[in-house]
């Protein structure tokens, strides 16, 4: 295998730069074929820097046209440069201005890092190390500078010229060209730099902050899409108001711009005052976006906006600290969504996501600590562990401290570290200092990989009125981390008495118990509750108070009791999931469910459906049968996804077959002809109705009702739900329906095309790979657009376990073939798709061998990017 030189970066090697860049003056002369980037960097040595210390700037694929210091061109012997660095041998020992010029070819930049062209629009992506693809620089997050940016371009090709901060000047530049000068006085690391130039439409609005400052808001997009930006704008204003209310954080510039671009490697980017978004997270209209899309837009708009404080004002010292800004900001966006929508429903969605993505990562070959201590390629660490587990850690901190102390700590964080590039240690220290709580052990959450397994056993002694609860925690070894230590695990809980109401106790010993929380700190603990009048049913990990896997051997009766009586909606939902999981896992194992068990579950499900107190969105979730990947994860070894899939299908048929009529009546009753609105109540109603449709089709096997809903749907949520049901089961109507969807809705709207691609990749029949190959081979297929590629191949890997893990290896080879091809053009997309293989070690032997062979072939085959080589290396280690 030939790869770019492998080198590992270690956290322990962190050292501050001997030079600092205080101010940056960038000048972009933009032409159709070339962009000339001139940089004037005001640099000075740090006080301790010994004279004669060379200055080494980062570059990536650059070629230097000229270099000067304080206006004087440098002699050949005074510097050394190649594509990846520029060294000034003996810089002046005082402040000086380093001037460089490089020529860029944005149209040829298919990696979509640095400056590139998307749909004719010039735009940038710099996090984490894209700025060095624009100019030679100290491209590290602890190098903070103020930026002034001048953009000059053809007035017709690029009437819009944007960068960070405030617009200070604009005007005519002669020859049909014009210019704009932007200044950002907030010192920032280069990864937050952005510029956009192009012919774009926009919508505008304004927001007045709590202290009375008016902020001009704009969202830029391709012409004709302006009306699809209203929801994003609405979400932005609500985010701004929420951050003031909930965290006391106001916006700090006069302008906030968002630009939607169609070629973007991930979701969005929080560049100071100029967020750049993947257009799929901006555009929404009822005919083409689903409720899930609306919720996703709201969430990501909020996320990027919240970064202004958690990420931009306070940034990361080095990339090992990525979780400092991402985990915290995900926590903040989750809280926003909970406040804007239903908190329990939001929590369930987040936990579902954690279980289906983060848990598999954390137990597989790519497991890593939320704050890793080494990496080969930082782009491969924008993971669900850093983001979602990172958010869970912040949530636990809030749980342990309580709301008031947590808010006090956050205030102190903003006060103490504003304007700094800092660390996880500093973050934890503000909470320790402001609350007096010792957080040393808590820090282990950031340093240790793997999902803790918590086992629970309990017993009730009627004679002594004593209830004992035995808890053990164990985290299995992960790659490179064989020894694990005990974590601080907050367990929010309650004891429920026979009549369904909460039970008290007179005293408890064996572990720290505070109100409704057990704090488990040891490997194991035995809690003794005295004065417990009856055998209680325990409700543990309420609101999913810690990201652990719980093993408790509870009877179906107790679980159904919880499903009915728990005051915590999360655990009510969880109890039903546990009942289904237990029956399903036994069945996969060959022990088919008995009718009595099924009856009990069915009754509970119908009771939930019938309730007048639960909201529709919650009911929809309660009726969900655990998905195949979550079940596979629970089984944990030698899994056969095809068998899990078919068992699950039989289970749904057996469970709901006898009550299809009831489900149909409920389905009809939820039909509404109100005009579409994206609000939580309406979305909840649609979610429940579409859940029922899925169960009706699953139970009866006839897809007629789904086909009917597809044709009559007045919005994309209902249409796409119906198409998904028909398309993934690949019923006899599927091919026709997909073709219809393609011609009528997808051909003129790339984001709808993505929906067609997703369903095309998810069919569980053996023909799916061939059909995908045909799609990719079509010359009209936009083979460099990350959204299109991910919709097809990403969905296949993550959402089509049956075909991806086919025993003949065809699914694996399809994906590795794709990765090899795309890697040459866009390593980030290739590496990301490849991570879908992380489940390979838990597959049954035949599939496992097939997966391994495909991976080994890929490793042999070609020259791979550092991104892909890193993932592959860890996957096969
Ligand atoms: N900071 C951005 C966000 O979370 C994401 C940047 C992703 N970068 C990457 N190389 N994957 O909002
Ligand atoms: Zn983020």
Image (cartoon, helix red, strand yellow):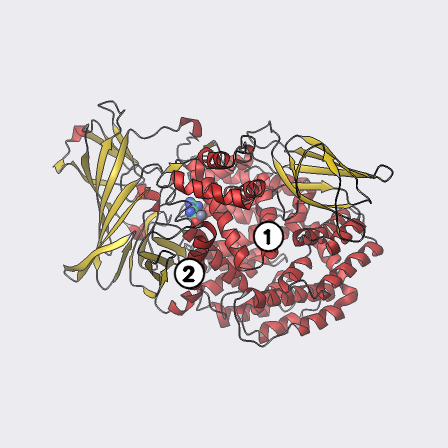
Which of the marked residues, 2 or 1, is nearer the chain's N terminus?
2
Which residue is denoted by mark 1 in the rendering? 347
Can you say which quadrant of the picture contains the C terminus? top right
> Disc number at residue 148?
none
Which residue is denoted by mark 2 in the rendering? 237
Residue at coordinates 63% horizontally, 49% vertically from top-left?
Answer: 543
Residue 817 in sight: no
SS category of the residue bearing label 2: helix
Q: Nearer the viewer, residue 737 or 623?
A: 623
In the visual, does 588 lie left or right of 138?
A: right
Residue at coordinates 75% horizontally, 39% vertically from top-left?
Answer: 506
SS category of the residue bearing label 1: helix
Q: Position of residue 297 (x, y in %)?
A: 47, 59
In the visual, does 39 lie left or right of 7?
A: left
- How many residues crowd around disc 1 within 10 Å: few (fewer than 14), some, or many (20 or more)? some
What number of labels is visible? 2
Label 1 CB sits under 8 Å from any ligand 2 atom? no
Q: Position of residue 871 (x, y in %)?
A: 50, 39
Rendered view: 638 above or below 715? above
């Amino acid at each position: 295998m030939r790869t770019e030189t492998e080198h590992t970066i270690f956290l322990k090697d962190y050292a501050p730069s001997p030079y600092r860049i205080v101010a940056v003056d960038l000048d972009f002369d933009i032409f159709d074929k070339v962009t000339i980037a001139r940089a004037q960097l005001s640099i000075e040595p740090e006080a301790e820097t010994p004279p004669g210390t060379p200055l080494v700037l980062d570059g990536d694929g650059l070629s230097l046209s000229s270099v000067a210091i304080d206006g004087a061109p440098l002699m050949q012997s005074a510097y050394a440069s190649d594509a990846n660095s520029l060294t000034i041998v003996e810089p002046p020992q005082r402040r000086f201005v380093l001037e460089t010029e490089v020529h860029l070819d944005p149209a040829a930049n298919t990696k979509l890092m640095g400056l590139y062209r998307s749909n004719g629009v010039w735009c940038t992506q710099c996090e984490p190390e894209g700025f060095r693809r624009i100019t030679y620089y100290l491209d590290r997050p602890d190098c903070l500078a103020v930026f002034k940016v001048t953009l000059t371009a053809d007035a017709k090709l690029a009437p819009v010229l944007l960068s960070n901060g405030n617009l200070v000047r604009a005007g005519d530049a002669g020859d049909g060209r014009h210019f704009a000068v932007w200044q950002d006085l907030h010192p920032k690391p280069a990864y937050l730099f952005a510029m956009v130039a192009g012919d774009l439409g926009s919508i505008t609005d304004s927001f007045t902050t709590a202290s009375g400052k008016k902020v001009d808001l704009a969202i830029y997009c391709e012409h004709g899409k302006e009306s699809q930006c209203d929801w994003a704008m609405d979400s932005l204003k609500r985010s701004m108001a929420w951050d003031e209310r909930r965290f006391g954080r106001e916006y700090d510039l006069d302008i906030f711009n968002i630009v939607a671009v169609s070629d973007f490697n991930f979701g969005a980017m929080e560049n100071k005052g100029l967020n750049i978004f993947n257009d799929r997270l901006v555009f929404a209209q009822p005919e083409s976006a689903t409720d899930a899309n609306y919720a996703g837009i709201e969430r990501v708009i909020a996320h990027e906006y919240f970064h202004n404080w958690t990420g931009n004002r306070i940034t990361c010292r080095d990339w090992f600290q990525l979780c400092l800004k991402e985990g915290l900001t995900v926590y903040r966006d989750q809280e926003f969504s909970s406040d804007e929508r239903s908190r329990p429903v939001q929590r369930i969605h987040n936990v579902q996501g954690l279980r289906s993505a983060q848990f598999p990562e954390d137990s597989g070959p790519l497991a890593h600590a939320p704050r890793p201590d080494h990496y080969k390629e930082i782009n491969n660490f924008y993971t669900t562990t850093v983001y979602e587990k990172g958010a869970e850690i912040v949530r636990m901190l809030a749980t342990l401290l309580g709301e008031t102390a947590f808010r006090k700590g956050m205030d102190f964080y903003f006060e103490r570290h504003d304007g700094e590039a800092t660390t996880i240690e500093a973050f934890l220290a503000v909470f320790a200092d402001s609350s007096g709580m010792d957080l040393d052990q808590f820090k282990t959450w950031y340093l240790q990989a793997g999902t803790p397994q918590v086992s629970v056993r309990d017993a009730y002694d009627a004679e002594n009125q004593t209830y004992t609860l035995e808890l053990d925690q164990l985290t299995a070894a992960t790659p490179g981390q064989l020894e694990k230590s005990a974590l601080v695990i907050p367990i929010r809980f309650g004891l429920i008495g026979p009549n369904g109401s909460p039970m008290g106790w007179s005293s408890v010993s064996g572990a720290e118990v505070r109100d409704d929380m057990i704090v488990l700190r040891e490997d194991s603990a035995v809690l003794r509750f005295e004065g417990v009048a009856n055998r209680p049913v325990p409700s543990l990990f309420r609101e999913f108070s810690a990201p652990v896997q719980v093993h408790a051997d509870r009877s179906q009766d107790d679980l159904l009791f919880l499903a009915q009586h728990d005051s915590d909606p999360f655990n009510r939902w969880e109890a039903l999931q546990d009942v289904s999981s237990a029956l399903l896992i036994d069945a996969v194992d060959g022990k088919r469910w008995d009718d009595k068990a099924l009856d009990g579950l069915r009754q509970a499900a119908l009771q939930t459906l019938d309730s007048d107190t639960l909201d529709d969105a919650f009911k929809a979730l309660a009726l969900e049968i655990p998905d195949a990947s979550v079940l596979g994860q629970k089984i944990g070894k030698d899994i056969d996804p095809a068998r899990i899939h078919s068992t699950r299908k039989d289970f749904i048929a057996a469970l709901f077959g006898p009550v299809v009529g009831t489900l149909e009546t409920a389905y009809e009753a939820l039909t509404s002809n109100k005009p579409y609105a994206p609000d939580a109540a309406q979305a909840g109603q649609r979610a429940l109705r579409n859940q029922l449709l899925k169960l009706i089709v699953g139970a009866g096997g006839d897809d007629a009702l789904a086909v009917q809903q597809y044709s009559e749907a007045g919005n994309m949520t209902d249409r796409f739900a119906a198409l998904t049901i028909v398309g993934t089961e690949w019923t006899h109507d599927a091919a026709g329906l997909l073709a219809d969807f393609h011609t009528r809705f997808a051909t003129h709207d790339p984001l709808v095309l993505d929906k067609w691609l997703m369903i095309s990749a998810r069919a569980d029949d053996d023909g799916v790979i061939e059909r995908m190959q045909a799609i990719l081979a079509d010359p009209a297929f936009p083979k460099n657009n990350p959204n299109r590629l991910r919709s097809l191949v990403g969905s296949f890997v993550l959402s089509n376990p049956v075909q991806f893990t086919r025993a003949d290896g065809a699914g694996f080879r399809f994906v590795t073939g794709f990765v090899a091809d795309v890697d040459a053009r866009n390593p980030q997309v290739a590496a990301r798709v490849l991570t879908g293989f992380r489940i390979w070690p838990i597959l049954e032997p035949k599939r496992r061998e097939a997966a391994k062979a495909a991976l080994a072939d890929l490793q042999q085959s070609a020259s791979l990017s550092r991104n892909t080589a890193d993932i592959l290396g860890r996957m096969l280690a």
